[in-house]
Amino acid sequence: MKIIYVTDLHGDEAKYWHVLKTAEKNNVQAVVNGGDMLSMEGDLHITQREFIFGFLNDYFTEFEKAGIYHIGYLGNDDLMIHDRSFDDVCSKYPHAVNLAQRKFKLGAYEVVGMNWVVDYPFQIKDRCRMDGKNYVFQRQLGPGLLSTEQGFQTLKDWFAAAMSLPTIEDELEALPKPENLKKAIYVIHTPPAHVGLDVCWSGEGVGSESIYKFIDKTQPLLTLHGHIHESYARSGVWKTNIGETISIQPGQAESGAIAYVLIDLDQMQMERVEEDLIVQRPVAQIP
């Protein structure tokens, strides 16, 4: 079974269409999208919802025609108020799967998703969690914000609010359990600490200690991550091992190019590809 793993497309339509055409060309059974799917332009309360009901609705129609699964979830830059909209659009198409905190059977494999992220300095906190009970917060760049239907709600004390929420460690424990870890694929937006998949431009590693420990303990077949676009460019690492588990974080290229990973699950062969964008939206055929 072949899949494509891609992450952090942030509403770039050219990248989305390139992925679909690449999937068709390579006869893959599924595209796995690791989060941060929606547009980052304008008023996110409006533009992201429009992207779901407009672009993604049309995009999933093409996956249905091709008989290819699209398995993914919204990420930390995708406002939580849009979760219901994303779920509604996915539910229209048998081949569109919302994987957030869920498990999906893909042939002989089970795919489990988690889109919570370790807290960071940036203001949107919809999906942020402390890594563990003793987590030390980073210096913040402004007050925390939560999305609501009326706009952003400013948090007077984000640290206190975060301390009342489950930690990343808690959220990992709450995930659906696969029947066979040797056939399990975890799609976790935040990368693990310590293995070079989490390196910012500053050189600092910002991955999750709890995720590293979870992988080391459970030893699934494969884990797929994203979140830190520049990590591969900074560390040169996109694939590594934690015990016998292979962990992947392809990073994401700037506009005009795309990065993704082609994976043959049966052979456990994989290739990171970074290439210029050449594919645009399919043109409807005129009868």
Image (cartoon, grey):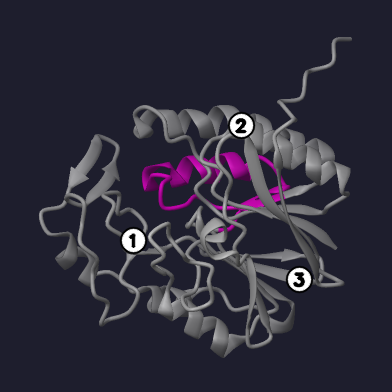
Q: Is residue 84 magenta?
A: yes
Who comes first in sequence, dot 3 or dot 1? Answer: 3
Please tell me whether residue 26 is drawn above or below residue 118 in the rendered image: above
The Cα atoms of the two marked residues, 3 and 1, are separated by 29 Å
Question: In this rendering, which labeled residue sits more in front, label 2 or label 1?
Answer: 2
Q: Is residue 80 magenta?
A: yes
Work out which quarter of the rendered image holds the C terminus and state it: top right
Q: How many marks?
A: 3
Q: Please say if 50 is above or below 164.
A: above
Task: In the displayed orientation, state which residue is furthest to the top.
Answer: 287
In the image, the segment drawn in magenta is 70-99
Q: Does residue 180 appear anywhere in the picture?
A: no
Circle 3 SS class: strand
Question: Measured from the top left, where is residue 22 in percent x and y?
Answer: 79, 43
Which mark is drawn over residue 180?
A: none
Work out how far the residue at label 2 is from the one at label 3, CA to CA, in angstroms. 29 Å
Residue type highlighted by circle 2: Glu
Residue 13 - label = 2
* Element type where label 2 sits in the image: helix
Q: Quadrant of residue 168?
A: bottom left
Do the CB atoms of the residues marked 3 and 1 lie less than 8 Å apart?
Answer: no
Q: Is residue 108 left or right of residue 44?
A: right
Residue drawn at 26 percent across, 49 percent down:
123
Q: Say if 22 sits above or below 132 in the image.
A: above
The residue to which callout 1 is attached is: 128
Query: Of marks 2 and 3, which one's residue comes earlier in the chain?
Result: 2
For mark 3, what is the residue? Answer: 109
* Among numbered discs 2 and 1, the one appearing first in the sequence: 2
Residue 127 visible in the current orientation: yes
